[in-house]
Amino acid sequence: MVEKEKKIWLEGELVDWDEAKVHVLAHTLHYGLGAFEGIRAYRRENGKTAIFRLREHVQRLYDTCKLIAVNPRFTFEQVCKASVDVVRANKLSEAYVRPLVFIGPGAMGVYAPDNPILTTVMAWRWGAYLGAGALEKGVRTKISAWIRHHPSIALAKGKIMGQYTNSVLAKREARIAGYDEAILMDIQGNICEGSGENLFIVKKGKLITPPLNASILAGITRDTVITLAREESLVVEERHITRDQLYLADEAFFTGTAVEVTPVREVDDRAVGDGAVGPITRRLQERYFDVVKGKDETHPEWLTYV
Ligand code: PMP
């Protein structure tokens, strides 16, 4: 459950949490066309709060808007500032920040080119996304019966609300069957990603992750981890992974703003490696937390102080 905070940024103003309402005729509520983001702010070693890779996330929000031909009324800089303002207004030292651009009420047909485009940014406290112990021990996963979007039916590079029905179905299927998370394949049988996170495997010391032309979101954490891995002199290959390659991986882990760097300890009831968190996963997880929480100050360009 999200705990109530004080303020939400809605259409240019900070309004009281309970007043941040939209009408049930909002077009996006009916048809799912809209853009959203998920961003984290961390309290750093120096005691200050910084939003991690804010500008890259807001850029992806605008890229998603471009993909779906929706024009936000607010500028890139205004949404960046709104994200800072909402964290500050709620006095949050750590937060999950969620901007949305959505289509408001007006015409109710599928084609509604003149409806207002509305923007909001909210923030709340959010701990380990896959539950206590996930970061430490890793998670149990199941390859989903649901297939990731084919590029001709959806826009995998967009973080579009309606596309997440696919993620919700896969996640539910996995949870009801007793697993922590789902892994989705494409129609050709390539492994793509989790319901809300990218996937890496380690084989013979090399990191392998599906390429950006797979049906995956271009994860900002994926990019962070690739950058940090190369700094650690690890070889990173972006190429397709099959189900059997995943089963035979030495290590596997998820990356995402919400999951951060979460080890995968099991896939379809098979242990990944020997079932313990592997050394490369642990090293990258530590490096990630050092960078976002400020023990490591090597990437100031990724920080927006609140
Ligand atoms: N894939 C999907 C489907 C996601 O929803 C997310 C979360 N935004 C990710 C990957 C990871 O992206 P990021 O690292 O930018 O949070």
Image (cartoon, rainbow, N blue to C red):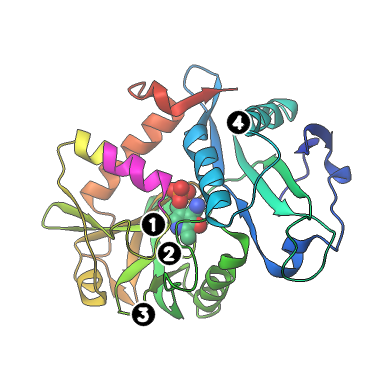
Direction from residue 18 to residue 303 in the image, left or right: left
| Residue occupied by mark 2 | 194
Whether residues under marks 1 and 3 lie with C-beta atoms below 8 angstroms apart, the answer is no
Which mark sits nearer the N-terminus, 4 or 3?
Answer: 4
Distance from Cα at disc 1 to Cα at disc 4:
24 Å
- Percent position (x, y) of residue 272? 26, 66
Determine crowd level at label 1: few under 14, some 14-19, many 20+ residues with C-alpha closer than 10 A.
many
Q: Secondary structure at mark 1?
A: strand
Q: Which mark is residue 80?
A: 4
Distance from Cα at disc 1 to Cα at disc 3:
18 Å
For this orientation, the residue located farthest to the top is 46
Whether residues under marks 2 and 1 lie with C-beta atoms below 8 angstroms apart, the answer is yes
Which mark sits nearer the N-terminus, 3 or 2?
Answer: 3
- Percent position (x, y) of residue 230? 20, 38
Rendered position, 52 above or below 215:
above
Q: Is mark 1 within 8 Å of ligand 1?
A: yes
Q: Which residues are magenta?
A: 218-227
Labels in figure, total: 4
Which mark is nearer the camera, 4 or 2? 4
Rendered position, 65 above or below 184:
above
Rendered position, 256 above or below 51:
below
Which residue is at 65% across, 62% downward? 33
Whether the magenta-drawn stretch holds residue 225 is answered as: yes
Is residue 237 visible to us here? yes
Q: Amino acid at mark 1?
A: Asn
| Residue occupied by mark 3 | 187
| Residue occupied by mark 1 | 198
Q: Amino acid at mark 2?
A: Gly
Q: Is mark 2 within 8 Å of ligand 1?
A: yes
Which mark is nearer the camera, 1 or 4? 4
Distance from Cα at disc 2 to Cα at disc 1:
6 Å
